[in-house]
Amino acid sequence: MYYDSLIFEISNKGRVGYSLPKSEFKSYNIPKNLLRATEANLPEVSELEAVRHYTNVSTKNFGVEKGFYPLGSCTMKYNPKINQDISNMSQFSLHPYAPMKSIQGILEIYYETQRILSELSGLHTFSLNPYAGAHGELAGLMIMRKYHMDRNDTKRTKVIVPDSAHGTNPASATVAGLISVEVKSNLDGTVNIESLKELLTDEIAGIMLTNPNTAGVFEKDILEIAKLVHDIGGLLYYDGANLNPILGLARPGDMGFDIMHINLHKTFSTPHGGGGPGSGPVGVVESLVKYLPSPVIKKQGEEYIIEDSNETSIGQVSHFYGNIGVVTKAYTYLLTVGKENMANIGRYSVLNANYIKESLKDDYLLPIKGICKHEFVFDGLIDKSHHVTTLDVAKRLLDYDVHPPTVYFPLTFKESLMIEPPETESKATIDDFIEVMRTVAEEARVTPDLVKGAPYNTVVKRLDEATAARKPIVKYSDLLK
Ligand SMILES: *Cc1c(COP(=O)(O)O)cnc(C)c1O
């Protein structure tokens, strides 16, 4: 139909989607040099055409609200609409320079969110200032650096990062002015203690860890690792993007971590992907509180206050308060789930992951046996005789209205297929997914070319991903060239 076209292609000269009364005002006295010489190239369509166009465009995208989205490392869970509605309330928008007395409500939300995150993580205080996970990492590493600098311990320039870490970890270390050094992982992604010991010198500022790691395995030696790193004067940074499976069950603070970030836009009710607003609160143990980025909200008697940014703080890492809307959603979510139910988030996401893992291990190669946490990795199909790759499987899943799992990450395996089914999915949905995965494995055996040619039912077929990344066509005018 015509509304499958670009909106410019359905444009008709003179067609309008509105009619306004003639303006009484003749001129706004806009200086000539600021007026455009030619008319803007805008599509001319009726209101109905515009509505149909955008409604159709919206259905061409894939999201958690359209189908199962088991993207490992990302916690793509459903976020209840009420949280969004509440954060949209006009009472929660504020002028950044509004006097503190007039914004006590939002400051209370900040204070309470800081407090609950501390309780869940076992770290003393949080700042909600960073915009994203990677931004929280950067803030955390700046704190780590400042801590050593303040002690005149200037030779600590290196941060240990496991080879299985998320790509943002070494990137954040570099941006924070530190050098990342890689520690080898065991096959299951846990830290190889012997390799770690070899790296522990007085040049080490600290270590960054994800626990459970990106292969969904809990670091059982974490207390020993913490002791080893602390003994040489280093600090431990916890990448909290994988907090979902341990919510209410285990706390990074109790494991010996000194600094961490939390992805509110993974764990606490903000959808992510597509570059939408996020929030990556950074939390620290008591001795590092003085370095936190401002604002940190405090309670003085009955009043909520922003403590004057002290000299020792790393400063502010985002504008004003950070992303208030994301914080408000997280707070609503934390209250609706409630303390007593928090641990069920972890339990159900772990149960879902193990159920899928065990159901599919006769078709897909399971390199790490045993119980996983919220996610796990297959190393492609077991039967590789037809050369059907993880990419082929991922593309074929699209034909069955399933978003593919994370592919080719972690780098530890050649054909990584990393599956994370969050707690918000029902058994029926998960059973459907298992069925689809088995069907694709069967197709790969019987009609491998069918899988290699997928997808067939999507708006665009198999993309030339290198060209799409290097020379993306993102404007209509580019298409006309
Ligand atoms: C998503 C993620 C990050 C980065 O978070 P962003 O908000 O995307 O910057 C860091 N570490 C892990 C393990 C993640 O999954």
Image (spheres, rainbow, N blue to C red):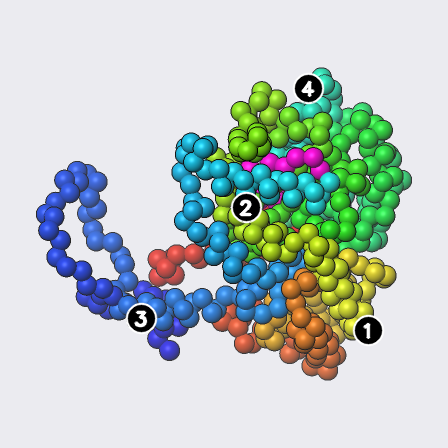
Q: Amino acid at mark 2?
A: Val
- Mark 2 lies on residue: 327
Which residue is pictured at 57% across the width and 30% down the height? 301
Nearer-the-camera pick, 197 or 256: 256
Where, by quadrant of the figure, is residue 426 drawn?
Answer: bottom right
The numbered dot on residue 49 is 3
Dot in front, 2 or 1? 2
Give the Cα distance between marks 2 and 4.
31 Å
Find numbered disc 2 in the image and state the secondary structure of the residue it sits on.
Answer: helix
Give the Cα distance between marks 4 and 3.
62 Å
Determine whether, in the image, residue 362 is placed left or right of residue 479: right
Q: Is residue 14 above or below residue 110?
A: below
Nearer-the-camera pick, 198 or 128: 128
Which residue is pictured at 59% across the width and 27% down the height? 314
| Crowd around label 3: few <14 · some 14–19 · many ≥20 (10 Å) | some
The numbered dot on residue 150 is 4
Disc 4 CB within 8 Å of nearest ligand 1 atom: no
- Mark 1 lies on residue: 362
Q: Is residue 124 magenta?
A: yes
| Crowd around label 2: few <14 · some 14–19 · many ≥20 (10 Å) | many
Which residue is outermost to the bottom?
446
Q: Amino acid at mark 3?
A: Glu
Q: Would you say residue 407 is visible in this rendering?
A: no
Q: Is residue 269 above or below residue 434?
A: above
The numbered dot on residue 56 is none
Determine whether, in the image, residue 460 is placed left or right of residue 389: left
Find numbered disc 3 in the image and state the secondary structure of the residue it sits on.
Answer: helix
Q: Which residues are magenta?
A: 123-134
Find numbered disc 4 in the image and state the secondary structure of the residue it sits on.
Answer: helix
Which residue is pictured at 57% across the width and 64% down the height? 64
Tell which circle, 3 or 2, labels the residue nearer the N-terminal end.
3
